[in-house]
Amino acid sequence: MKSPLLRKIGGYVFAIVFIVAGWWITAVLVNSPALPTPAAAVEVLLANADQLVPYFLTSAWRVVVSLVIGTVLAVPIAHVCARSRTLDALFAPVLYLLYPIPKVVLLPILLVLFGLADAPKIVLISLTVFFQVLVAVRDAVRAVPESAVEAIRSLGGTRFDEYRHVAVPATMPAVFTSLRIGVGTAIAVLFIAEAMAGSTGLGYYIMQSWSMVNYPRMFAGIIAMALLGVVLYAIFDLIEHRLTRWR
Amino acid sequence: METQGAHIDFAHVSVEFDDGAELLTACRDVTFTVEPGQAIALIGPSGCGKSTTLRMSCGLLTPSEGTVLVNGAPVEKPRQETAFIPQDLGLFPWKTVLQNAALGLDIRKVPKAEARERAQSALQQVGLAGFERAYPKELSGGMRQRLALARALAMRADLLLMDEPLSAIDALLRESLQDALLDLWRQRRHTQMLVTHSIEEAVYLGQRIVVFSARPGTVVADIPNPGMGEPDWRDSPAFAEKCQEVRHALASGSAQLADGEGGAR
């Protein structure tokens, strides 16, 4: 019998082999300086590592802060909305109208309002994350059966106990699922924001390399940005896993 | 451990629900008492207000009319010493067995160490020692049932209210759980109210069987059941006779209602 851990590791090894092989074949077929082979890319990444680090840290900082701000604002509002009919009736239409709007179109306005540094990027990504977490958690709170809340009440529990023992633990998985999924969107928005304005972060680094027609340097930036996404995704996946052992 | 069971007194209790469209009467003029340490069963057709009665006894619901007294005091909010086992058992999948068993104490601000100890000994009592760190999904239906019971035991309740707790359990296992319930009650002598729609269960676990009519539910019969708890009670002819008596009471309860409604219109 194979252990589940071994099987999991085997799965990842297979995935990496599959992706690298696909990349290699494509690079060879395309035969363009814009798409180096994996070996060349790794070489470039190592060569540029020193100058990449500050760009990477700037981008990582922006994403992480935005994820935190978006979540911290969304979770309590989601709970309140889901538990109060009046507030929900008031907010649900607003939410429905705003949720599908791609927040990235607000970038020009934010640039005018907040300048070119961290602030407009953080506001934009926070906004994106905020709506994703809000919708997911609001639905999760609603899915909590009334009987669970009643069980707490029958034990003499207060409103606080209802949150502590039911609403919060029941919706934790939804928070981290939406964050895990949100990482992809957050980094996409980050790339656009950094590419369009300012002179910091990986988005800027990639676009600058592109305009210099320095494809190896550009590719190093792309790999760094991909890495940022993978690391954050893995972290949220891990937390989600730990929190949902009961499932 | 023996407890002094609670005294329950329902006097002319009616409950009305406003479901938006019309006023529904869940139960009307319900009057009965339960002596300290007595175990009774409530039985009746679906929607007859027996669950409503239970919910009033533990303070989840207040009557529209009449009074519900536990130990002489009106039940305005959940009482410390009342344990309520709802139909879905009220277990939380994200809490371990031990955390679930200790939840009642946790909410009552019992010190952590004491809560843990009491929960652990309650788990032992119901045969769940060794499962403290498991999650409910890892337990069988019967074990989950016993976990719900452990929570009530840890609280040292003097009043145990159960709303069809065994309805999701298959027949053979149900009998052994009924035995477990009976044993516990005999050891502790708490007051016990069991809502069921199984006639056999009512006759097996109720010293008295209070029969409700269909909605709006009211007490149509209060059948003494002195044989309850006798050895081999389930297999005795008297048991079968008592079941028949309850069945008749249920049937005439429904008939009475039909007549009543015909007369009113």
Image (cartoon, helix red, strand yellow):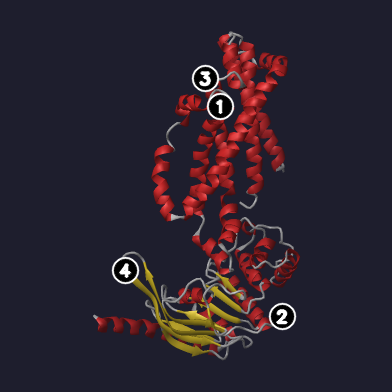
Taking the image as shown, residue A141 lies to the left or right of residue A221, namely: left
Report the residue marked by disc 2: B1
Query: Farthest left residue?
Result: B265
For label 4, the crowd category at 10 Å Cα-Cα, with few meaning under 14, some 14 to 19 and many 20 or more, is few
Provide the chain ID for the residue under circle 1. A
Which image quadrant: the N terminus of chain A? top right
Q: Mark 4 vs mark 3: same chain?
A: no
Rendering quarter of residue A17: top right
Disc on the earlier residue, 2 or 4: 2
Provide the chain ID for the residue under circle 4. B
For label 3, the crowd category at 10 Å Cα-Cα, with few meaning under 14, some 14 to 19 and many 20 or more, is some
Taking the image as shown, residue B66 lies to the left or right of residue A114, namely: left
Q: Amino acid at mark 4?
A: Glu
Provide the chain ID for the residue under circle 2. B
**Which numbered marker is on residue B22?**
4
At 61% from the left and 15% from the top, the residue drawn is: A218
Q: Amino acid at mark 2?
A: Met
At 70% from the left and 22% from the top, the residue drawn is: A53
Disc on the earlier residue, 1 or 3: 1
Do the numbered discs 2 and 1 sit on residues whose CB atoms are within 8 Å? Answer: no
For label 1, the crowd category at 10 Å Cα-Cα, with few meaning under 14, some 14 to 19 and many 20 or more, is many
Mark 2 → mark 1, Cα distance in angstroms: 64 Å
Comparing marks 4 and 3, which lies closer to the viewer?
3
Report the residue marked by disc 3: A196
Mark 1 → mark 3, Cα distance in angstroms: 10 Å
Report the residue marked by disc 1: A190
For label 2, the SS is loop
Residue A220 in percent (x, y) is at 65, 17
Mark 3 → mark 2, Cα distance in angstroms: 74 Å
